Image (cartoon, rainbow, N blue to C red):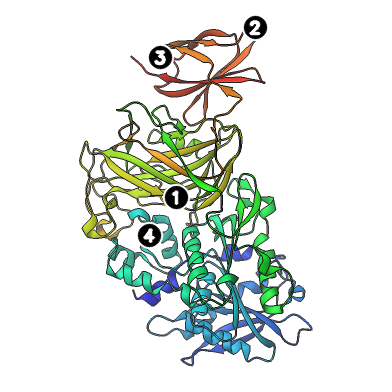
Amino acid sequence: MTIQTTNMLKHVCFSFATLLLFANSANAQLNPVIDSIPMSDGRKLAADIYIPSGMSSGPVILIQTPYNRQISRFAGLPMGIGLNLNTSNFIFVITDWRGFYGSRTAQYVGSPDRGRDGYSTVEWIAKQSWSNGKVGTWGPSALGKVQYQTARTNPPHLVCINPSVAAPQFLYNEYYPNGVLRTEYVEQLDQLGFGLTPFLMAHPYKDFTWSFTESANNYPDSIRVPCFMIGGWYDHNVELMMDFYEDVRTMSPVNVRDKHKILMGPWVHGGHGSARVGTDLQGQLSYPNAKDKNDTMALKFFDFYLRNVTNGWESNSKYMYYQMGENAWKTSEVWPPSGVSNTTFYLHKDGGLKTQIPQNATDSLTFTYDPVNPSPTVGGCTLRNDLDQGPYDQKTLVESRGDILVFSSAVLSKDVVLKGKVKVQLKVGSDRLDTDFDIRLTDVYPDGKSMLVNDAAFRMRFRNGFALSNVAMMSKGGVYDCIIELPNTCLTFLAGHRIRIDISSSNYPKYNRNMNNGNAMYPGNSMDSLLNPLVASNIVYLNSANVSSVILPLLNYTSSIESSTIKHTIQLQPNPASTACFYQLNSSESKSFSLKIYDVTGRMVQENTEVSNSGWINLEALEDGIYTVIIGDGISQFTEKLIKQSN
């Protein structure tokens, strides 16, 4: 596979199903002018040209697609135009990529230079009688990546670009984040017919080929026109986009640096299902005030640069982003925003996430990981057609399993505002030569739902680096650092919620499942082989000598997160207890209370609706583990940790 081929493959996931969501009518359709555009080698690309009635000439928005330009004839045009072409202030030109659909005969031996094809297309448009010479580009995913490639060639009549959920880089860490192959992502690209697997299987370590490829596909200094990037917090391109945006702001030509802007919403990548950039429903959550924000802002961008409309576009901040939780649009000139500082929370053996360092010198928790029965992927920034995208509840399918450790903060007494990248620093061990550690960050609602925010994985053989020479196996009894950085996000954990970190050793099929045997990771060049898998017993150390922690980038965080309405005023004896324990509530009132017991996942496992200030709690039906006892009267409530431990 050549470098040009890898250029073509990046971010190919904006599917037919997503394009159909533009449709306003199943029966109506647009009737474009059909033409062909000559390329530099004499071959021609098929093009559909949409000119609003009465427009003799005007600015043009170019869309270059591998997904069949003809779909727009009945699915409609983007940015809210749909089938109402005459409401548009722009002419649209949609072309099929060389080698695809109407441009299939333009294919030739070797890999096409899509940037050069974009150059030829822009300059052809500028010469047409219906064009006023101003051309902008639009499109998500693969349609976004080709915009960067076109801009890199610097067509004289290209005025601006608007790529969504896309960035130009081709990085090792995108396909092997922390050394772990993104299985479902690559499988989906293969299913679309773009076959990355042979290249990736040949280069599972960060070698010279990766270094050369990364250098060839990162060119912020070549973006010479204003770029308006649109992304989503639940998209898999978050880090690529945020990094590239920062680079174009500092490395593109001086005359254009301050004209680039980015909009980050609460959106998934899209490609299948109903959720995409701009819809209100994302996974199991809804964000009504984010609906179509991408379209309205893109139209303002094009109005300003292609139509010279005075609409205040340049006064918009560099970063425009959605703060989930409080569900509000925010702005900033820098990233992370001013006022954000790191706050460290420590993992404790009782399942707590606390600002206090553990005092015990020997605490640890152990869990098992069986590659044959891996912890499943439930939502998140996935791509494969059979997987859900976006925020989904982890409680039932992930946190209820026995192969996970769950650490939760106290119930929050006030909103806790997170902006940026969460870093998890673990001290770990295993009885196997190699294993993975997977992190999920969740927002726990008062009703117990544990909604996924984002996730990451780490393969322990790569703890010293990702080159073959860096590989190091683990030894039984050894204590190792495992540092995992999660993608940027913006979420306000509301008062009454809890912050949670889940630790497992798989998130499948999003990430390749480690076989734990220390052998070749992909035997037979299979992305999902299970050759001689072993069950691992993995350890997370949680003590004063070996602390495990989570660093949260919080805005103006100054005080305790523990809820003022939940007070530790229950005495439980004995604790730990085996079959029963006696509770004493420090309340002088003589009335009935409700007593509820929750496990570490937030699931209520026992309830007594009428209890007094004191009494016995029967624990025989509970499995060994850590629980939370809550006693309340509907106005006040009291809580305490309980450990069930059989003799």
Q: Amino acid at mark 2?
A: Ser
Q: Amino acid at mark 3?
A: Ala
Distance of label 4 from label 1 (alpha carbons): 13 Å
Distance of label 4 from label 3 (alpha carbons): 47 Å
**Mark drawn on residue 173:** 4
Q: Position of residue 461 (x, y in %)?
A: 26, 50
Q: Position of residue 190 (x, y in %)?
A: 41, 64
Question: Residue beneath label 1, please?
Answer: 486
Q: Residue at x 49, y 37 (%)?
A: 500
Q: Amino acid at mark 4?
A: Asn
Q: Nearer the viewer, mark 1 or mark 3?
A: 1
Q: Earlier in the sequence, mark 4 or mark 1?
A: 4
Distance of label 2 from label 4 (alpha carbons): 61 Å
Question: Residue beneath label 2, please?
Answer: 590
Depth check: 205 or 67 in front?
Answer: 205
Q: Earlier in the sequence, mark 3 or mark 2?
A: 3
Q: Secondary structure at mark 4?
A: helix
* 10 Å crowding of disc 4: few (<14), some (14-19), many (20+): some
**Looking at the image, can residue 518 be seen?**
yes
**Mark drawn on residue 552:** none
Q: Residue at x 50, y 63 (%)?
A: 241
* 10 Å crowding of disc 2: few (<14), some (14-19), many (20+): few
Decide if residue 85 is on the left or right side of residue 435.
Answer: right
Distance of label 3 from label 2 (alpha carbons): 27 Å
